[in-house]
Image (cartoon, helix red, strand yellow):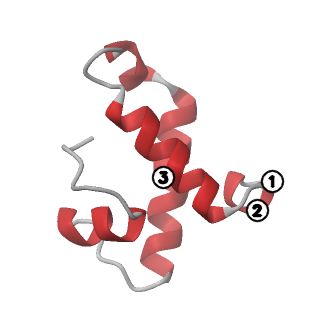
Amino acid sequence: MKLTERYALDELKLVYRVLHAALPENPELMDSMLLEELQRELQERAAAEGVDVSLHAQWAAWLGGPLLRGL
């Protein structure tokens, strides 16, 4: 079962933003399978809603947080 089917979308977005913001202090998160899977599922969901996830501003706006530095 996909994460986006098990948890509320807003909760997943928040968790992703928090983990992503922690990358500078925790570079080992770059190798996290959880973060990778979460990002992939969120990007799939965003794309299904018409968001061009290759455009950072659209992706960040959909996530609901400030512009995030690339991952």
Residue 57, by quadrant, is bottom left
Q: Which residue is mark 2?
A: 5
**Residue 53's disc number:** none
Count of numbered tags: 3
Q: Which residue is mark 1?
A: 1
**Nearer to us: label 2 or label 1:** 2
Q: Which residue corresponds to the image point at 52% horizontal and 50% vertical from the top-left?
A: 14
Q: Looking at numbered disc 1 in the image, what kind of residue is underneath it? A: Met
**Residue 34 x %, y %:** 57, 33
**Residue 35 x %, y %:** 50, 35
Q: Which residue is mark 3?
A: 40
The residue furthest bottom is: 50
Q: Looking at numbered disc 3 in the image, what kind of residue is underneath it? A: Arg
**Residue 41 x %, y %:** 55, 57
How far apart, in angstroms, are the residues tagged by discs 3 and 1? 14 Å
How far apart, in angstroms, are the residues tagged by discs 3 and 2? 14 Å
